[in-house]
Image: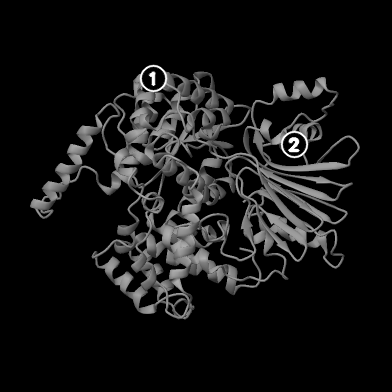
Amino acid sequence: MVGLAGVVATKRKEIDIEKLSSLMCQVIKHQESHKTELYVSNGIGMGRVHLGILNPEPQPMFNKDKSMWIMMDGEIYDTQDIKTELISKGHIFSIDNDPELILHLYEELGNDFVDKLNGSFSLAIWNEKSQKLLIVNDRYGSRPIYYANSNGYLLFGSEIKAILQDKTFEKKVDDRSVTEFFSFGHILGNKTFFYGIELLPPASIMTFDSGKVSIEKYWDFEFNKKYEDHTEDYYIEKLSNLVLQSVERRMKGNKRMGVMLSGGLDSRTIVASIQKKHYPFYTFTHGESDCNDVKFAQKISTRLGTIHNFLEFKPEDIIKYSENFVYLTDGMINIVHGQRMQTYDEIAELVDVVIHGWLGDATTGALLGGFLIDRIKFEDNLTIFNRVCQKLPDNLIKNLFSEGYFPIEKNLDFSRNYILRTGENIKLPENRLMYYDLKEYNRRIMVSGFILIRNSLEFRIPFSDNDYIDFFLNIPTRFMHEQRFYKKMILTMFPDLRNAPYQKTGLPLYRSIFLIHILKLSEQFLNLITRKVFNFQIFSKKTLNIADYGEWMRKDRKLREYILNILLDQRTLERPYFNQKFIKKILYLHMSHKKDYSNLIGLLITFELWNRKFIDQKNLKF
């Protein structure tokens, strides 16, 4: 993935900083079209690998006396007022791009400069005089920075494999992360698969000074403990205006723009919010050709008048792209999503930047859909979080691992304690649910998922806008139940979408929650009494998923063989992690239609490919 990479070793003369920083940049350059800039000076080597789309001017950018310089990945929005204020205070601009403005802002305000930044970014500022490095990311950590403080020198990069270019770094697998990967489908907190390598938390100012790392948090999701007494219509009007403002901010520049369009609520809101002056406009949908998500997205595109493109998923794509997928994502996201890779290359032929609906559902009550607010109030933090993450049962996890690997109970207890601590300061359970999703599930999945996009093109995420989020945190949660608020907002803003069906129900948005529940109960009742003879289905898998991975694994001969050849390979079975008999049992139960273990099988394949690439091989270069 494009991004930053570097090493600071002012006290370690034996380290070849230029060679190491060059290798770190090379390993995160995955396409010939990627551009690389490298700068080495007085104990620091730092590079930027980029697409030449955002802030394409060469970096680093220096201040007037060259006592400080900056490298930046990403962009910020609405900078004119900031620039005008800085000019009034004597600052002189020569390039007029984001990193130059940020460096001036840092000179003027010190660490408080972060409060002025609204965007998606990671950046590093080096002070030549004090030999101090500052690394800062945006509120959500949307552009990852991994780091390791190794024997008094700092290694950092947008991908873990950059840090592993230091051959003196001891690659020791973090057992807690392995447990969490199979329990939750992702790693919790800031851990990675390696002890000693961590993900920089979102909204962080990290300082490396005299061989020591310190991290200051500058922002967090803070829900109001006492909400103001306004009507639902008041909040809908305010939030609607902020959505329109946020989308318009992300249309800046002369870039070729497109939107990832699904049958969900977030992407249709974004597309409908784009002003007609920006048309003609591209939209993109990927998935199986006959899934409802694809069909509904096409209907929305037709209604709004976009140039729509369908990118088909096929079982053979998992085989074709899985190894490169695991390599790019450092093994931290399930390979069942690997077929997305080729779609972004295809999209990059038409646009430079895609607008993505990430955070939309999480900030408008989607996670509260399906359960009652009163019921949530009686559940503990762990139960809520397990529902959000669809955690595998403890007994399945315990049986999965071999007896001699490590104490599973201890690792599960560690994860539980971490979860409980994460939300302990959130007063209302319904807010706690959103907080967990924003802080954990969405963040870690997003970090890995956006890597795939950014290997080919850039992204922008309107629902992460500072003004939008700040207002959202003040909306009473009583309005968020079952997505009623979100649906009402869309119907108020865009009445032309009234009849457009929603992927999770197959029904138009104006249909009542009561009717949806009645239909769900009817489906369950009829399937029970008919023993599924008539296969009465309203809410089928194809309504909810872009692809039926479980059936792919069973019915596609090549994919089935690929899975069995990897998981039953002697090299896989001899690893110390797993119970061999249980893996064989999982495969039998899934392939014979007795259970659906597609997600777990995907995780097992992912972890084995990660071992082969990151543990077995000495040199990391795909």
* Image x and y of residue 305, in percent: 42, 24
Which residue sits furthest right?
65
Q: Residue 231, which numbered label?
A: 1
Q: Would residue 353 appear left or right of 186 to someone viewing this image?
A: right
Seen from the viewer's position, the closer of residues 537 and 216 is: 216
Q: Which residue is mark 2?
A: 99
Kindly identify the residue that appears in the image at 21 percent across and 38 percent down: 517
* Image x and y of residue 492, in percent: 37, 20
Seen from the viewer's position, the closer of residues 346 and 294 is: 294
- Please say if 126 is above or below 332: above
Seen from the viewer's position, the closer of residues 334 and 341 is: 334
Q: Would residue 444 appear left or right of 117 to someone viewing this image?
A: left
Q: Amino acid at mark 2?
A: Pro
Asked whether residue 60 is in view, the answer is: no
Q: Would residue 65 appear left or right of 81 to someone viewing this image?
A: right
Q: Residues within 10 Å of mark 1 (few under 14, many from 20)?
A: few
Which residue sits furthest left?
529
Helix, strand or loop at label 2? It is helix
Q: Image quarter for residue 316?
A: bottom left
* Image x and y of residue 159, in percent: 63, 55
Q: Quadrant of the C terminus?
A: bottom right
Asked whether residue 303 is in view, the answer is: yes
Q: Would residue 299 appear left or right of 355 to someone viewing this image?
A: left
Q: Amino acid at mark 1?
A: Thr
**Front of the two marks 1 and 2:** 1
Q: Residues within 10 Å of mark 2 (few under 14, many from 20)?
A: many
* Image x and y of residue 19, in percent: 80, 62
Helix, strand or loop at label 1? It is loop
Tag 1 near tag 2, CB within 8 Å: no
